[in-house]
Image (cartoon, grey):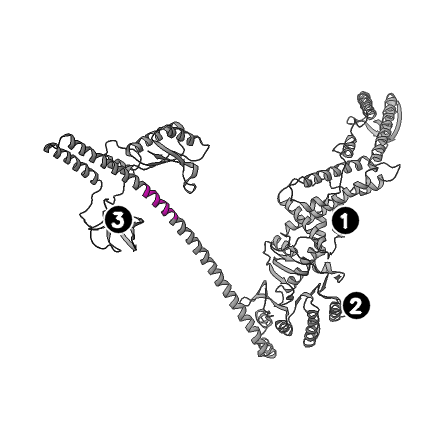
Amino acid sequence: MIYPENFEIKIGFAQVRDMLSELCLSPLGRQYVNRMAFLNRHDVVERLLQQTYEFKQLLEADAEIPLQHYYDASAYLDRAAIEGTYLEVLAFFEIKMSLRTIRDSLRFISGAEEGQYEALKALGANVTVERSLIAALDKVVDDTGAVRDDATPELQRLKRDLISQQGALRKTISSIMRHAKNEGWTPADAEPTIRGGRLVIPVIAEYKRKVKGLIHDESHTGQTVYIEPESIFGLNNDIKDLENAYHRELIRILMGLTNTLRHHVPELRKAYQYLGLLDFIRAKAVFARRVEASKPKLHNYPLVNWKQAIHPLLYLAHRQLGKPTVPMDLELNRDQRILLISGPNAGGKSVSLKTVGLVQYMLQCGMLITAADGSEAGIFHDIFIDIGDEQSIENDLSTYSSHLTNMRKFVTVADKKSLVLIDEFGTGTEPVLGGAIAEAVLQNLNDSKVYGVITTHYTNLKNYAERTPGIVNGAMRYDHKNLQPLYQLEIGKPGSSFAIEIARKIGLPKHIVDKASSLVGKDKIRYDRLLEELETEKQELEQKVREATKLEQKLAKSVKEYNELRNFLEESKQDVMREAKGKAKLLLKDANQKIEATIQQIKQSQAEKEQTKAARRDLEEFTKEVRKEEPRPAHKRIANGTIKPGDNVSLIGQDSYGQVVGIKGKTAEVLFGGLKTIVKVDNLERVEGQIPQKPKKSKMETSGNYNRGMNMTQRMADFTNTLDIRGEYAEDALNKVMNFTDEALMLGIPEIKIIHGRGNGILRQVVRDYLYSVREVASLGNEVEERGGDGATLAVLK
């Protein structure tokens, strides 16, 4: 039940209905808009919502669904159903084009993937349009609405003869006109014209006897007469006969086509019903896009759980003005059924109430609602509203009497499946009595488990709501400092009317405002001031929350950057360690070879003193060459003694120096240069003196231009095990890879990395083909995904 009769006008749904009518493409759709009504069946409402939601998805996907030729052929079908009648060419054109639209729409929707547009598919499940019927119509009428010349052989012959005769007639009449103009019998700018369906020439009245023929007409002034020359009587007669024959043949064709159409009338009525529904659903979907509506989760019981709900008409009006519309969150459930909204005038109380009424009514008419995704809604069996001035002169009702009449309706009819909307509850009479009656009515509605939204200024109702289960206070927020409404609904506390403050702002004389304050009483002033202080504290808290949120976002960003830097350093550490191990392996290999060569030399010389000394000198020179790589200040290794944090240490048998950061059991955390690593304490020895710093290399030294004159240690130190050939031509890249690989093999590098990128895979293929051909390459593989994946090749060397 919807109460009162003008409910749609009061909540603004009449405007929504008008908008939907304008969005329809045909009278078929507008008929459904006019028949749209409030529904309380959950399954029906769910189906209508799903249809609209799916069509909205189609529009948002820019799907090529047909949107033309939505003709209403109902009247044509009614006429075609009568025996002995025939339809005109225009009727067949509209039927053909609209049936094509229906067929294309059915094919488009049914051809969608499984699981898509299921509600729209079900809508056209029993609709069929015979292809042969469209073909029969297309054979007679083309896509411009004209009859095809070759509709039948006889029609084609008549059309050909008619064109031939008309050509001969034009040729003859042109000759007569030239002669008449040369003789001065007809005006110089005159042209042949039609009178009574016959071709005639205009002749000056005084020369009408000069032209033999039949006078058909004369001008208004009588100065010109229109004569059909005698010489074209036969041609005009022949053309008239051909036109009559053509018309008879056309009627015969249209009769036959109408008879064919008559057999399909029942199925065509279903097809046009489908086209009208499609137009209606499309209009609802277009409206939903304009107001940014969505489909809520629908329950089969009363419920309102809307997020960011807005009044659709207010939203459209504000958007035209470039103004924002403040949304509201609203929840009415079994434990919180009635919302009592209070606050200052012009603060948005009535708009909130109308929003509830309009959005719920739209929902139960099968329209998507102006609320955010994630909203939930339920089904009400009745909606009652009491809003505005309903005084009636005819029924001798005052404004307050009309309100009481509505209250009587509410308390006698409304139940647990009803939604009651009351604006300015209790006003219109003496405040104390009005407040008392309003409280009694509110108690009755609450006892009946009614759902509702009520606006009021009465303090007794706010107090009653505060202490009564099932009813909750709500306030329209107000900026008391600037005395401006914020249009924000806050549930959980009552609102103040701010009447004294507004009166002071408007400029009412101070003594009047003071007098009013004293008349109201200290308790009322204290109550409003408390609400004012709560509002201030809320605004300050919201500001702090916003600032805390910004700080939290900033902290999260810093943590992310820290983690990324830590991961980068960890990756760099692994690269440095791997390169250092390779260089150490090469150095050890060279040292071992030198020692073995020295021992062999001593053995071969049979321990001759001079040759033994020479061999030792060569070994010492080699040791000096290895150790002169970096200048080091004087320091002393201390093998004994406990190592503790802060000590300078080196790896036993190596020239790597660092500082102990911390010790945990048998392991120590040592800082070598800028890199921290974990080392067993037994592998460390304490050193005295300043730790040598490795000098920075110049760009020339790191450019990859290898100096063949360098000693082995220096070349090994300068060698980097990574080569980047991205962007190179294949031939140039291959040369670089060959030189790079040769250098690595000569220096004894255990592993090399070549970065070639992904691209089209040419460089990767060239690199790997070459490396497969090198016998010293033990294996090939991709880099780990985090460092390039198949965009880089790792080669392990023997």
Image position of 437 with respect to 186: above or below: below
> In which quarter of the view is residue 133 placed?
top right
Q: How far apart are marks 1 and 2 (CA)?
A: 36 Å
* Residue at the image point whose x is 43% and y is 37% from the top: 790
Query: What's the distance in space between the residues labelled 2 and 3, CA to CA?
Result: 108 Å
Which of the two discs, 2 and 3, sits closer to the camera?
3
Q: Tell me the residue that label 1 is attached to.
A: 31
Instruction: Determine crowd level at label 3: few under 14, some 14-19, many 20+ residues with C-alpha closer than 10 A.
Output: few
Q: Label 1 is placed on what type of residue?
A: Gln
Query: Is residue 533 at least partly visible in the picture?
Result: yes
- Residue 393 disc label: 2
Q: Nearer the viewer, residue 41 or 140?
A: 41
Q: Which of marks 3 and 1 is nearer the N terminus?
A: 1
Looking at the rendered structure, the secondary structure element under dot 3 is helix
The image shows residue 373, relative to residue 383, as above or below, that is: above
Residue 460 or 789: which is nearer the viewer? 789
Residue 697 % position (x, y): 27, 40
Amino acid type shown at disc 2: Ile
Q: In terms of depth relative to the viewer, which is nearer, 423 or 576?
A: 576
Region of the chain picked out in magenta, as a range: 567-578
Vertical position of residue 637 compared to residue 518: above or below = above
Q: Which of 298 and 771 is in front in this view?
A: 771
Q: In the figure, 179 relative to 105: above or below?
A: above
Tell me if 88 is positioned left or right of 713 in this view. Answer: right
Quarter of the image where one finds residue 193: top right
